[in-house]
Every structure is written in C-alpha cells, then in structure tokens.
Amino acid sequence: MKVQLLPSSINDDGTASQGQRLTCFVVDDSVAFDAGSLAFACTNLQRQQIRDAVISHTHLDHIAGLPIFIDDLFATLTEPFRIHCTTEMFEVLESNVFNWDIYPRFSELTNVYGNVLEYSLVEPQNAFKVKHLEVVPVTVNHNSPSLGFLVSDGKVSVGITGDTSETSEIWNVFSECENLAAVFVECAFPDEMGKLASDSHHLTPARLASELAKLRDRKYPVYVSNIKAMYREVVVRQLDDLKLSDLNILEVGKSYAI
Ligand SMILES: [Zn+2]
C-alpha cells in the first residue's frame, strides 16, 4: 500500500514545504482520506484516478480542496465523484459549502455523463469498501464529529487517526488488527500550549506519548502528522525527546510504501 500526505504550502524557492496547513492523505494514488489540499497538490495521475474522498470531519483544513477538485473534474467525470462521510458531515457540507453561496451544489448538477457528485453515508464502526480498500471508521475525540480510520488493502492495514485528543476506541481497533503496518497520528501543538490543545481537541507530544501507550504490542512505525506549521520545530524537538521506538515525523509529500 502506498500512502502520501499531499503538500499544502511552499518554501521561498517555490518547492513544496514540510509545513502542513491542510490535510489530505492519498492511498495508492486513487483514494483520498480528507481533501484539504486535494485540488492543489495532487499529481495529474491522482487527478485522473481519485473519484472517492473519505472525510474524517468537516473542518476547513480537511475539506478546502473538495469543491475545487470537483469543479476541476466537472466536465470530465464519467462517474460521480463520491464523498464518503457521516450524515452529520453530509448536512454540514450541503448547508455550509455546497450551498450555491460558497460554491455550487454539485449534487444537483449533471454533465453529459450524468450526476457529478454523490454522497456515500457511513456509520462509525461499520466497515465499508472504497475501490480496493476496506475502511473501518472509528469515532475519535475532536470538537466536531470526527472519525479515524483503519484502512486495509487485503494484505496490510494502516491506521489514520484524523484530528483527535485523548481517545480510546481507535487504539483498541488498531491493537486488534493483525496486519497493521503503520499508524499516522496527529500532534498539533507543543506541550506548553496544552490549554489550547485541550480547547481545540488536539494532542501535544506528552499527551501523544500517553495515547501511544494504549497500543498493545506495537511493532510498526508511527508517523506524526498535523503538526501546526507555526510550531513545527518545537513539536519535532519535543517528539524527539520522548525517545519512543519507531516514532517518526511524517515527511510531507513523500510516498510511503507500507
Ligand atoms: Zn479539526
């Protein structure tokens, strides 16, 4: 399985930076998990192949690229683009994003091939198929209804927490998975910003260490993402200081062969 976090900002010389301001994981160049930078930083192959976005929650940094991506594809979609999300997320997207004021309601529009946007509603804990992947959505602890995911291609599985603060169920789901090969976890703020991390339901390095201790018999790498770009340096230093085995900072833009 190939997993890539798409870039979302640039360096002074125009190259992709490690600063993460939006979230979009792409699996096997064909399924997006969140769509923050989907329209802006995907390759042409990914633009041709991705017709499914699985949404963890509706915060802007996770959906910003969604309307633009569908707009880009509009005339060429020979099948509808599918948004996989809960009923609550569907209602938020239709009333606050695809509402004609912010952007067109693509679910009401057609091109010469038919519908251009469909929703596929998911329920926490109920596994569903997307392309060649099986996805188990798991409720996590954020201040908008949010999911993390266990994603399997039949050979290996990866875990993606999405945005979360202290939680429990997803660690149990990951611990019970026999072919889990990597976990992608969030850690937004440095330890000294614990109050803001609590208020916004994110993790700090110290809290991440407590969370990872809930994983039983971990023998696979953990990759840390969703580090607020402003605090990246200090968060990376605090994560290094934890000296946890196989804890890695996720390299933005890199394709990981899992
Ligand atoms: Zn969020």
Image: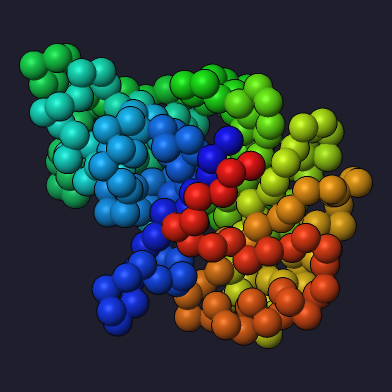
Left or right: 58, with 214 as reference point: left
Q: Is residue 72 visible?
A: yes
Farthest residue in the right direction? 217
Q: Is residue 139 visible?
A: no
Q: Quadrant of the N terminus?
A: top right
Front-most of 50 and 175? Answer: 50
Q: Position of residue 50 (x, y in %)?
A: 35, 33
- Residue at the (19%, 34%) spot, across then down: 73
Farthest residue in the front direction? 257
Q: Position of residue 59 (x, y in %)?
A: 43, 53
* Colour style of the rendered protein structure: rainbow
Q: Quadrant of residue 197?
A: bottom right
Q: Position of residue 249 (x, y in %)?
A: 63, 66
Front-most of 220 and 65? Answer: 220
Front-most of 109 and 245? Answer: 245
Front-most of 215 and 89? Answer: 215
Farthest residue in the top direction? 113
- Residue at the (33%, 39%) spot, across then down: 46
Q: Position of residue 151 (x, y in %)?
A: 62, 33
Q: Quadrant of residue 225?
A: bottom right
Left or right: 211, with 17 as reference point: right
- Residue at the (8%, 16%) spot, across then down: 112
- Residue at the (50%, 50%) spot, across then down: 255
Left or right: 184, with 212 as reference point: left
Q: Quadrant of the C terminus?
A: top right
* 163 versus 103 height, above or below: below
* 173 versus 146 height, above or below: above
